[in-house]
Amino acid sequence: QVQLVESGGGLVQAGGSLRLSCAASRTLFSLNTMAWYRQAPGKQRELVARITRDGDINYADTVKGRFTISRDMTKNTVDLQMNSLKPEDTAVYFCNAQRMASSYWGQGTQVIVSS
């Protein structure tokens, strides 16, 4: 089992920044991947950014150059730095961990970007 707890969401104006953090209950070394997803009202959940155990990173095209995923292996946390936020970034952001054949989700944190 892996418990994930997100923090850092909130309300921000367009062009602003927010930093999300996800704390995992297991060492990141035991997890295949850590990722951030988001789900806007009426839309499907989509991948925002992913980092593998080996450190490989990929981003959704819509956030490339604006968002940065990073991790702290000593604290078992994965952060998402979000800059130049747009109203279309408004969504509930979820932390995800993959371990072996299982997928785990946090409870989500709301991000609202006002225009």
Image: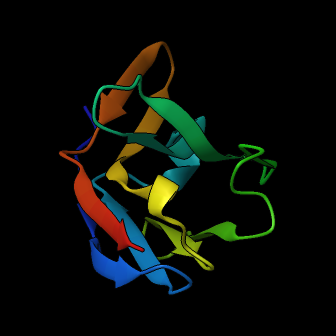
Question: Which residue ends up furthest to the left in the rendered image?
Answer: 107
Which of the 4 image quarters holds residue 111?
bottom left
Residue at position x 57%, y 50% from top? Answer: 29
Q: Nearer the viewer, residue 26 or 108?
A: 108
Residue at position x 33%, y 31% from top? Answer: 104
Left or right: 13 in relation to 66: left
Which of the 4 image quarters holds residue 6?
bottom left
Percent position of residue 35, x then y: 53, 45
Question: Which residue ends up furthest to the front in the rendered image?
Answer: 115
Residue at position x 66%, y 67% from top? Answer: 67
Question: Which residue ends up furthest to the top in the rendered image?
Answer: 101
On screen, residue 96 above or below 111: above
The N terminus is located in which quarter?
A: top left
The C terminus is located in which quarter?
A: bottom left
Percent position of residue 27, x then y: 44, 55
Q: Nearer the viewer, residue 77 or 26?
A: 77
Q: Nearer the viewer, residue 43 or 64?
A: 43
Percent position of residue 83, x then y: 61, 79
On screen, residue 104 above or below 25: above
Q: Does any portion of residue 13 appear in the rendered image?
A: yes
Counting the numbered discs, the total is 0
Percent position of residue 13, x then y: 40, 83
Left or right: 57 in relation to 22: right
